[in-house]
Amino acid sequence: PQPPLPLLPRRPPLLLRQRPGQGNLSRASRTKSRTIVRKTRQETMLSDAEVTSLLQKVPSASQADRHSLAAQLSKVAAKAEDPMLLQLGVAASSFVSWLSSEEPLVRAYTACILANIAFLEAGQQQVLNAGGVPPLLQMLKSGEEKKVTLH
């Protein structure tokens, strides 16, 4: 018979990283914090009517309005379900025109919108039909683009 394996010392439980001054959080406090974060995220999502309203502004948006619209719609696209992505795809030709914007953030937000639309097969067709592939490839090839932080 083989000798018994030695017992390994018991490891202390892993603790959540704490912010300075936060102290030890109980399991109930951590759960409550997570619930608040989830509710906050849900509350920041736009309603379908609000998204439709934003999409109506896209084709005629001025250069000044594009930044705000692109930022809001890129957040929507990042969390959108399939029907909403297809709704965004209807404006693909307008978004493609925004890829030539002077403002790097508008180009970056717009590329994110188009990328999310293209997750769906029907969305890929919308982006392709809008002529979005060449400008997106140009953005990828370009060494001039500055790195931008989104959201």
Image: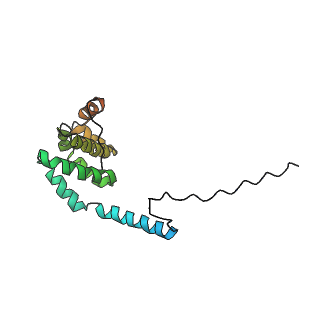
Q: On the image, which quarter does residue 21 sit in?
A: bottom left
Q: Nearer the viewer, residue 18 or 63?
A: 18
Q: Is residue 96 left or right of residue 43?
A: left
> Is residue 85 at least partly visible in the picture?
no
Q: Residue 80: percent from the left, percent from the top?
A: 32, 54
Residue 94 vertical position relative to residue 34 in the rendered view, above or below: above
Residue 108 vertical position relative to residue 49 in the rendered view, above or below: above
Q: Residue 17: percent from the left, percent from the top?
A: 49, 57
> Is residue 75 at least partly visible in the picture?
yes
Which residue of the protein is positioned furthest toward the front in this rendering?
Answer: 21
User: Which residue is found at the position 26% from the left and 37% from the top?
Assistant: 128
Q: Is residue 3 left or right of residue 121?
A: right
Q: Is residue 24 left or right of residue 77?
A: right
- Here the colouring is rainbow
Q: Nearer the viewer, residue 20 or 7?
A: 20
Q: On the image, which quarter does residue 93 sit in?
A: top left
User: Which residue is found at the position 32% from the left and 51% from the top?
Assistant: 78
Q: On the image, which quarter does residue 123 sit in?
A: top left
User: Which residue is found at the position 31% from the left and 46% from the top?
Assistant: 116
Which residue of the protein is positioned furthest toward the bottom in this rendering?
Answer: 28
